[in-house]
């Protein structure tokens, strides 16, 4: 037994975690330091090295951490090589409808999981929105909402990978359950974003048709690393279920995607090593490891039985916990990864998390993160379009309220 009671230890640790998050300390540092603090308070000192060792050599931990690193490297190289610009530009040229372009371009940029990524798609959205004469708050809403629409069904999303691993299920299972939610997000976003917007006549249709073959070729080349990675991940999920549950499907897919990217971009050595000099790629990877270490520390303290008893005696509805805890964490941390990685150990200490619960936890944390006022994409988008946060929330909150019920419908019916 450690220095203090497990309940006090977890309260102190989570309070410390909240302070670090408020101070904007990197999530990777926050999760790992919190896990070590909890272990120091609640466990024998001699058992802590074993806890770290067992977490570090766990196959699931290793595969998810390496997959996270591979995906972050892939996304950084997309940016460094300019492939992401070619991808978005070619897609914009292929589609003549400004409304569709405004929906698709932020989603394509969404393939690049970088903090504040909505700022990358903002100029593209702004250009198309001018054709529709949209107000600044409408431009900001469309950019923010559609920037994040792809993540719940994107096999290479590091948050989705971590959630599936912590929930003991496959990425493919999570995606299948979340397709209806994304469909509702798309419909809601389109209706709210373009309500009463007038579709203009495009005078460049003839020119675009003439060059459509070039635009299509550029799109296929620039999209090929992502497309191949998705095909490999989904194929491995379908053929090797055990492999996918250990996280190796996404690891292999990300490596294949890197090889394809190197081939199509003719990557130089200098460009390849540039992302390794950035802390960002290591911070997210460190956070993935921290999620497993924090979960192991909570399990080792024996807090699970105490929390389970509290939830049972207090007649707390399990669905309410699955929704409220991750959503609140998503809002407070302004991070889908933060909401997911903190919520799973807490909820896993109260009851055994089933695959369908894992999906609901993910969606709760994810949608909470999307509407967080301190979310970088939210802030950058509002600033870029010179839009007051209150005006942006006029569209964001109704969208959240119309989308989230579908997550509950899927949870209860399937």
Image (tube, grey):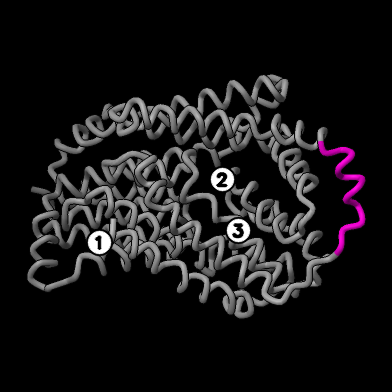
Q: Which mark is residue 12?
A: 1
Specify which label sits upstream in the sequence, 3 or 2. 2
CB under 8 Å between callouts 2 and 1?
Answer: no
Marks 2 and 1, how far apart in space? 32 Å
- Few, some or many residues within 10 Å of mark 3 (<14, 14–19, 20+): many
Q: Which residue is mark 2?
A: 113
Specify which label sits upstream in the sequence, 2 or 1. 1
Is 329 a magenta residue? no
CB under 8 Å between callouts 3 and 1?
Answer: no
Residue 252 percent coordinates (x, y): 45, 24
Specify which label sits upstream in the sequence, 3 or 1. 1
Disc 1 element:
helix
Marks 3 and 1, how far apart in space? 38 Å
**Image quadrant in which you'd find residue 293:** top left
- Tell us which disc is closer to us: 2 or 1: 2
Give the magenta-colored segment's residue range: 201-212
Task: Compare residues 380 and 82 and report the one nearer the observer.
Answer: 82
Identify the residue at horizontal 14%, vertical 67% (top origin): 311
Q: Which residue is mark 3?
A: 146
Identify the residue at horizontal 30%, vertical 34% (top origin): 245
Q: Is residue 248 visible?
A: yes
Task: Compare residues 181 and 210 and report the one nearer the observer.
Answer: 210
Q: Is residue 202 left or right of residue 168?
A: right
């Amino acid at each position: 037994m450690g220095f203090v009671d497990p309940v006090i230890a977890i309260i102190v640790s989570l309070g410390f975690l909240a302070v670090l998050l408020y101070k904007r300390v990197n999530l990777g540092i926050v999760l790992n330091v919190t896990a070590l603090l909890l272990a120091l308070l609640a466990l024998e000192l001699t058992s802590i090295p074993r806890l770290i060792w067992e977490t570090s050599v766990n196959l699931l931990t290793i595969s998810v951490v390496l997959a996270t690193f591979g995906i972050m490297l892939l996304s950084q190289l997309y940016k460094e090589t300019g492939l992401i610009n070619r991808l978005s530009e070619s897609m914009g040229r292929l589609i003549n409808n400004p409304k569709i372009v405004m929906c698709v371009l932020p989603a394509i940029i969404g393939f690049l999981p970088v903090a504040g990524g909505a700022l990358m798609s903002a100029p593209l959205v702004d250009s198309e929105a001018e054709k529709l004469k949209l107000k600044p708050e409408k431009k900001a809403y469309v950019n923010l909402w559609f920037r994040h629409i792809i993540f719940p069904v994107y096999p290479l999303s590091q948050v989705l990978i971590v959630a599936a691993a912590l929930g003991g299920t496959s990425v493919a299972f999570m995606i299948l359950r979340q397709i209806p939610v994304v469909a509702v997000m798309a419909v809601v976003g389109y209706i709210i974003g373009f309500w009463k917007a007038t579709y203009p006549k495009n005078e460049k249709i003839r020119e675009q048709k003439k060059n459509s073959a070039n635009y299509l070729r550029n799109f296929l080349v620039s999209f090929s690393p992502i497309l191949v990675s998705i095909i490999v991940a989904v194929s491995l999920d379908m053929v090797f279920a055990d492999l996918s549950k250990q996280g190796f499907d996404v690891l292999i897919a990300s490596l294949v995607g890197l090889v394809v990217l190197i081939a199509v971009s003719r990557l130089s050595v200098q460009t390849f090593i540039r992302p390794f000099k950035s802390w960002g790629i290591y911070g997210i990877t460190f956070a993935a490891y921290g999620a497993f270490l924090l979960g192991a520390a909570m399990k080792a303290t024996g807090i699970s039985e105490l929390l389970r008893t509290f939830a049972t005696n207090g007649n707390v509805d399990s669905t309410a916990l699955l929704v409220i805890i991750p959503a609140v964490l998503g809002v407070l941390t302004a991070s889908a990864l933060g909401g997911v990685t903190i919520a799973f150990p807490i909820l896993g200490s109260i009851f055994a998390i089933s695959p369908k619960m894992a999906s609901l936890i993910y969606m709760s944390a994810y949608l909470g993160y999307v509407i967080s006022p301190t979310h970088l994409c939210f802030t950058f988008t509002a600033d870029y379009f010179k839009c007051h946060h209150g005006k942006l929330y006029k569209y964001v909150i109704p969208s959240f309220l119309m989308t989230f019920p579908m997550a509950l419908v899927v949870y209860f019916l399937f």
